Image (spheres, helix red, strand yellow):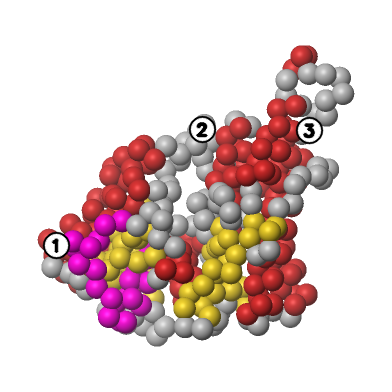
Amino acid sequence: MASKVLHSKGRDTFGVGIATTEKADGCILANVIKQFTTKSGGIIPAEAAEHHVDVCDMAIAEALAAAKIAMRDIDIVSFSQGPGIGHCLRIGAAAARTLSIVHKKPLVGVNHCISHLEIGKLLTDAKDPVLLYVSGANTQVIAFEAGKYRIFGETLDMGVGNMIDQFARQIGIGFPGGPQIMKLAAAGKNYIELPYVVKGMDVSFGGILTNIIRKFESGNKGTAAPLSTPNYRKEDLCYSLQETVFAMLVEVAERAMAHTGKNELLLGGGVACNTRLQEMCRVMCEERGAKLFVPERQFLVDNGAMISWLGILEYLKGTRTAVEKSAILPYWRTDEV
């Protein structure tokens, strides 16, 4: 069975993935990613949606070509129904509905967050992991426990990726800001104390963002700044930001592993591409005698392949999404599935 996915992720990516169960344990036949970027400033939902419209046909054609199949060979059309930014989700959902109706294929709407967990399990040796899901809009610790997907910890305000992107925008970096922040952090030498906000199993980033922006602004006021104002280097601020928020994430992930008794940690989401976060998670797992699993980058970031694969899993369990019930769910929680 092959599954064709028209997929607009909740933030900046329009992806088309094709998966099949014709090979043992499943197989990804195509994974085309079209990302919306800017040279300065952040993501504007309406502009991202326009980008998705522009690349939609191209992404579909490239995916079919990569898989060496035609639309007649497709059995299922699945799409990201939520959560995410409404402007972007609507484009993927509209494209999926169109393909489903025109080509008379079953339609399956799936949860974006759970797809990160399931693609990770497919592509690694992870069997029953705790997922540290860190992306732009989402920051959650997820695991399958007692017959249900459960959130064991999450952000109380913004996603860690959004927080990093907002700071990047403040210091003059375009979107996405994470890769540039990681490069600057690698050149940092001095740790600058920032708020460390872990509340039980949850984390909060808003106060950290405000604090680090004020520190940056205090050292970048030119001759008008008081002589006593610290002159914080960008590199040191980026280094300190990563060390602080990643330590918070590793702490809550480890606590979830201890609570559930699981000995596997799986990373998912675009922020999981950060090599420093991977290193910190690896050290924690080694100290616990646990295993860390990190899919390759194209499956960490938002992508169509993960929606395709979850579409197959849902379809095999009997899930079908009627067109009239395929409205997007921008606030669809993982533990509501």
**1 and 2 marks in contact (CB < 8 Å):** no
Residue 232 got which mark?
A: 3
Looking at the rendered structure, the kind of residue marked 1 is Ile
* Residue bearing mark 2: 41
Instruction: Using the image as rendered, state which of residue 106 and residue 178 is in the foreground.
Output: 106
- Quick one: SS at disc 1? helix
Instruction: Using the image as rendered, state which of residue 327 and residue 27 is in the foreground.
Output: 327
* Residue bearing mark 1: 101
Quarter of the image with the C terminus in it: bottom left
Q: Which percent across, then down, holds residue 172?
A: 60, 31
Q: Give, as a single range, the part of the protein colored magenta.
A: 304-328
- Mark 2 is surrounded, within 10 Å at the Cα level, by few (under 14), some (14 to 19) or many (20 or more) other residues, namely some
Quarter of the view holding residue 276: bottom right
Q: Is residue 2 magenta?
A: no
Q: Earlier in the sequence, mark 3 or mark 2?
A: 2
Apparent side of residue 327 relative to residue 213 in the rendered image (left or right): left
Looking at the rendered structure, the kind of residue marked 2 is Gly
Residue 43 got which mark?
A: none
- Quick one: SS at disc 3? loop
Toward the right, the furthest residue is 228
Q: Earlier in the sequence, mark 1 or mark 3?
A: 1
- Mark 3 is surrounded, within 10 Å at the Cα level, by few (under 14), some (14 to 19) or many (20 or more) other residues, namely some
Looking at the rendered structure, the kind of residue marked 3 is Tyr
Toward the front, the furthest residue is 200
Name the residue at 68% across, 63% down.
200
